[in-house]
Amino acid sequence: ADFEAASKAHDLGRTGKLSAAQLRGVLARLNLFGGDMTEVDEFAQLLAEGCKRDASNFDYASLVAGGTWKGPSVKDAIARVCGEASDAPAAKPSKRHLLSILYYKIAEASKKLGLSRQRAFQGLDRGDKGFLIAEDLRA
């Protein structure tokens, strides 16, 4: 519902579509990334690719209606971006997309648990190293 309301507020022509700048504005307004526009840009690309939409002419009206998400599930979007588990090993996801997924998951967890993003990161960072390793994410 928040995505739809923010999209309608940015869609001045009421066309059901957003430009790349408007899409970034919508995602920034949702405050998932703490104001970091680099993360917003990466997530906008990831969202567009996961939903099979053009980021420069993003058709939000076909993805959300009446506050209900009609687009692909998170699992389907991740499979589309990263490839299916049965794909050939050559079809490895780019690290840029994996980083966007990590940013999204940290933002989602911090919002759900009422923690700051720094606090959520510290919760994942076992041993207070200041960075995450694979073992931290598996736990």
Image (spheres, rainbow, N blue to C red):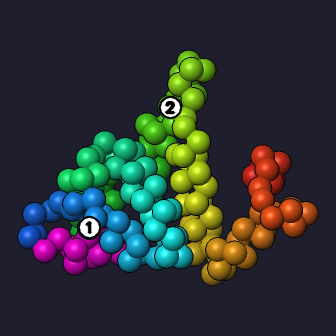
Question: In this rendering, would 4 be left or right of 74?
Answer: left
Is mark 2 in CB contact (under 8 Å) with mark 1? no
Q: Mark 2 points at which residue?
A: 83
Return the x and y of residue 125 as percentages of the image width and height: 81, 63
Residue at 45% over, 64% down? 40
Q: Is 4 included in the stretch rendered in magenta?
A: yes
Cα distance in 3D space between marks 2 and 1: 28 Å
Question: In this rendering, would 89 be left or right of 55?
Answer: right
**Quadrant placement of the N terminus:** bottom left
Q: Closest to the observer: 138 or 121?
A: 121
The amino acid pointed to by label 1 is Gln
Residue at 27% over, 76% down? 5
Q: Residues within 10 Å of mark 1 (few under 14, many from 20)?
A: many
The label number, if any, that marks residue 22 in the structure image: 1
Magenta stretch: dominant SS? helix
Q: What is the magenta range?
A: 1-12
